[in-house]
Amino acid sequence: MTATDRAPTGEPRLEDLLRDLAPQVLGTLVRRHGDFDACEDALQEALLAAVDQWPRQGVPRNPKGWLVTVATRRMIEMWRSESARRHREEVAVLAVQPTSAAPTERDSLTLFILCCHPSLSPVSQVALTLRAVGGLTTAEIARALLVPEATMGQRISRAKQTITAAGARFELPPPAELPSRIATVERVLYLIFNEGYVASSGPSLLRVDLSNEAIRLTRQLRAQLPDDTEAAGLLALMLLTDARRQARTGPDGTLVPLAEQDRSLWDADRIAEGGALLTTALTREPIGPYQLQAAIAAVHDEAARAEDTDWTQILGLYGLLETIAPGPMVTLNRIVASAMVNGPQIGLQQLDDAEADHALAVHHRAIAVRAHLLEIAGDREAAERAYRLAARRTLSVPERRYLESRAARA
């Protein structure tokens, strides 16, 4: 490749460029060749080649075309080594002709939907989305999800094989199926963000790489679905929530609850962007659970001080959310809002009723809410016991330390 083929200066970081290109290239490969597993493997080798060559030789003027070419050559090499060499080479030569595989505007959306195929478990959907759409390496995903790299490699490999065995094709599902498949994609992105924002286990409260990746991918999804109010609501929710990131931990990594955060550390730009997205989304029907959660986050963000929080409005929003998307955590948050409006005794009574659901009764967050309400009500001895029980139940080290500190102060 000659010097005239190189990209001009001022290009984005190589890592960011490759992650942006990865889903585009994979979409092109899968649409041309149809074998998701082989295409994804070939893409990874092309990405490794780019990491090796581009820093030394410069970024090509057409980096996507370069990656497609290298990955296609790798696939042809693999096919040549098999018994049906001649036939597969003929198919490959035909497949790489430009007239047979013009990219479509919906490639990114199609790839999202393919990675969130209903034949996969939620964990596999998350891993494959991060790998194929996010462009993360197996090692990066393993670190983010706190599992051994070998385990993650096996999980991703099985996910690709499962998709192939299910006969999935690189095309959008029929119109009747599209809303439910998009809803699955949004749920997977929501799971990725939540795991980054409040790590379910491990030594750190935050996994910033995951929450950032969720926001980046959700931006991509919304670009593909500009009229989808829930895609806009989901992005608004992430931005309005992530805006508080810098204030959520102390210098030593300890958890800082919302009421005690230094609100001057909140990201005003993210709050403004999320608020604008939400305002636009709420003017159109239908209103879904991500929009309602974003609205709740916005009410919190609008309060200059914790004592200025409009808990009555939050309680009303949780009531709507519980109607259209009921769940134990929604119920728990609605109880907290009710206690802030009506007093801790009312909250404790509602918590007693809700804990008829055994799964909620034993969850560390429900126990922590009980401890908080007992503390507000003045029953410090019972609050201390509940805080210590909640601390024993959580798998998150920062949460455990925070709950133990609350127990000591109760």
Image (spheres, helix red, strand yellow):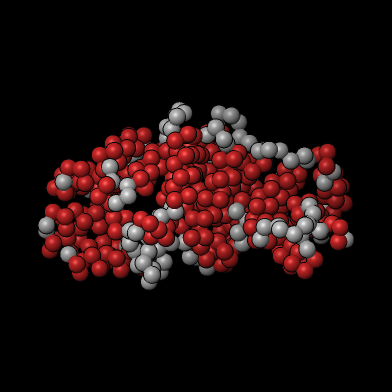
Q: Quadrant of the C terminus?
A: bottom left
- From the top left corner, tell me how far across and down residue 96 is, in percent: 82, 46
Q: Is residue 339 above or below residue 158?
A: above
- Left/right of residue 95 with respect to residue 230 in the rendered view: right
Residue 35 in percent (x, y) is at 71, 48
In the image, taking residue 159 as reference, residue 103 lies left or right, namely right
The quarter of the picture where the N terminus appears is bottom right
Question: Which residue occupies the foreground of this view, 122 or 311?
Answer: 311
Determine which quarter of the picture holds residue 349: top left
Q: 23 or 402: which is nearer to us?
A: 402
Q: Quadrant of residue 142?
A: bottom right
Give coordinates of residue 86: x percent, y percent. 87, 51
* 156 up-or-down from 56: above or below: above
- Residue occupying the point 48% across, 60% down: 208
Inspect this view and state whether residue 79 appears: no
Which residue is at 36% across, 67% downward? 250
Residue found at the far bottom of this picture? 252
Q: Residue at x 77, y 57 (%)?
A: 8
Q: Tag count in the figure?
A: 0
Left or right placement of residue 70 versus residue 328 in this view: right
Instruction: Please tell me in which quadrant of the rendered image residue 311 appears.
Output: top left
Q: Residue 224: tell me if it is visible.
A: yes
Q: Residue at the spot x=68%, y=52% of the render?
A: 21
